[in-house]
């Protein structure tokens, strides 16, 4: 599995929550709360560092695996209370 930049993983998760455009009833998502485990790493690319973040490769971890991070993020449409 190729490790991706964290922003790519976030975009994919957000797009997965997008309503189907062919749905009979229009649906508008105004907020999205994510609480997911992530495998996070820093990658050196020349003089720059890139933050990588993927969903876990395996469902269960062993003592040999790095401890997974957890991402909790709340997206809300502006102007909503």
Image: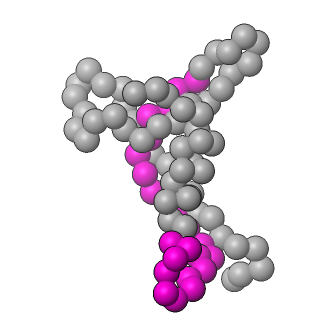
Q: How many marks?
A: 0
Q: Where is residue 56 drawn, in percent x and y?
A: 37, 38
Q: Where is residue 5 drawn, in percent x and y?
A: 59, 34
Magenta stretch? 20-42
Q: Where is residue 51 drawn, in percent x and y?
A: 61, 30
Q: How is the image coloured?
A: one colour
Left or right: residue 73 versus residue 78 is: left
The quarter of the image holding the C terminus is bottom right
At a point 56% along the width and 83% down the height, the residue shown is 27
Nearest the viewer among 16 and 54 is 16
Can you say whether 16 is above or below 45 in the image? Answer: below
Left or right: residue 60 versus residue 55 is: left
Q: Is residue 72 visible?
A: no
Can you say whether 21 is above or below 27 in the image? Answer: above
The quarter of the image holding the N terminus is top left
Residue reaching furthest bottom? 25
């Amino acid at each position: 599995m190729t490790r991706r930049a964290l922003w790519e993983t976030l975009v994919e998760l957000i797009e997965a929550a997008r309503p189907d455009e062919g749905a009979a009833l229009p649906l508008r998502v105004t907020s999205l709360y994510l609480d997911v485990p992530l495998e996070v790493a820093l990658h050196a690319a020349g003089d720059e560092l890139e933050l990588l973040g993927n969903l876990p490769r395996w469902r269960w971890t062993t003592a040999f695996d790095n401890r997974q991070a957890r991402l909790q993020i709340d997206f809300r449409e502006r102007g909503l209370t």
